[in-house]
Image (spheres, grey):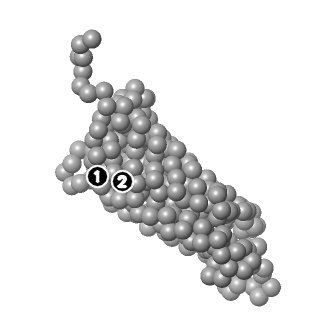
Amino acid sequence: MESTGGPYLNTAAVTSPVGIARLLQMTFGCTTFSLVAHQGGFSAAYGTFCMFVWTFCFAITVFIIACEFTHLHSCLSLSWGNFTAAFAMLATLMCITAAVIYPLYFVQVGCYPIGCEVRDFRIAASVFAGLLFVTYAAEVFLTRAKPGQVTSYMATVSGLLKIVQAFVACIIFGALVNDSQYSKYVATQWCVAVYSFCFVVTVVVVAFSVTGKTALLWFPFERSVVIYTFGAVLLYTSAAVIWPVFCFDSKYGSPRRPDLCAKGKCPWDSQLVIAIFTYVNLLLYVLDLAYSQRIRFVSHI
């Protein structure tokens, strides 16, 4: 049979710097959750989250390597460059979170009461979790857009910031549901509406970019994203002013942590986390607005 196309297998998918980084991701990810599942152990919501992160990232990485090695990604209804760039950034954020949470809650210096063998497994899992984060961060560094380079939107600074903004919003939502008492005032409910609206629109922007459907829209997607980012800056500015006033001003809340507030179940702690990450996301949206005016969208890469 005569071949009419190129090679069936793309060896660059595993021999290029990005390919090598993905192979290391697969190796470190498998090692991490295997150590935890075999002997390290995990429990409660924190441990379950860490295991989900490692298994999820491992599965998607294997999928990406397989698709690129066999050229199957060309058959998918995805903007492959946007998809891989978005996943690499998301995996970086998820892995650094798990790499901090697991040793914080499960690693101890002494052997009692879990035993020295379990302790050693947990330490080893923590080390590989840190290496896993490094490899995903390396992929983000290798695939990021260079000045003057035509690349996918999600590989640009603005595209990567979209992933970070959505991730930070998830942290805010986690603190909101942890007895933050946001329903106490209409003003704090407005802040929740701001967080929710900006999160949904950001996810929609990422979804349209990853699926490569931006060219099918009847309105100029590029201009709409810039306008939305400007609106998000204004909305987050209002939340950054309102939330601290209604949570930490003595007229509405408490400027200091109450002495009788239980650790892990204190509304004041959740309110503080929300305030901090509100300012973090405000800064991210300001940076996004600055960078978004310098780029052009490419949906088919």
Q: Is residue 280 left or right of residue 36?
A: left
> Quick one: SS at disc 2?
helix
**Alpha carbon separation for disc pair 1 and 2:** 6 Å
Which residue is tagged 2?
21
Residue at the (72%, 65%) spot, across then down: 178
Which residue is drawn at the image coordinates 36% and 37% (left, top)?
Answer: 68
Q: Which mark is residue 221?
A: none
Image position, residue 32 (x, y; %)? 54, 59
* Quarter location, residue 270: bottom right
In the rendered image, residue 147, in percent from the top left (x then y), is placed at 21, 55
Could you tell me residue 57's position as x and y percent? 51, 50
- Give the position of the C terminus as an image quadrant: top left
Total marks shown come to 2
In-image side of 196 versus 264 (left or right) = left
Question: At 40% from the left edge and 41% from the top edge, which residue is drawn?
Answer: 65
User: Which of the image's four quarters has the N terminus?
Assistant: top left
Residue 98 x %, y %: 56, 63
Secondary structure, mark 1, is helix
Q: Residue at x 29, y 38 (%)?
A: 11
In this view, 206 is above or below 2: below
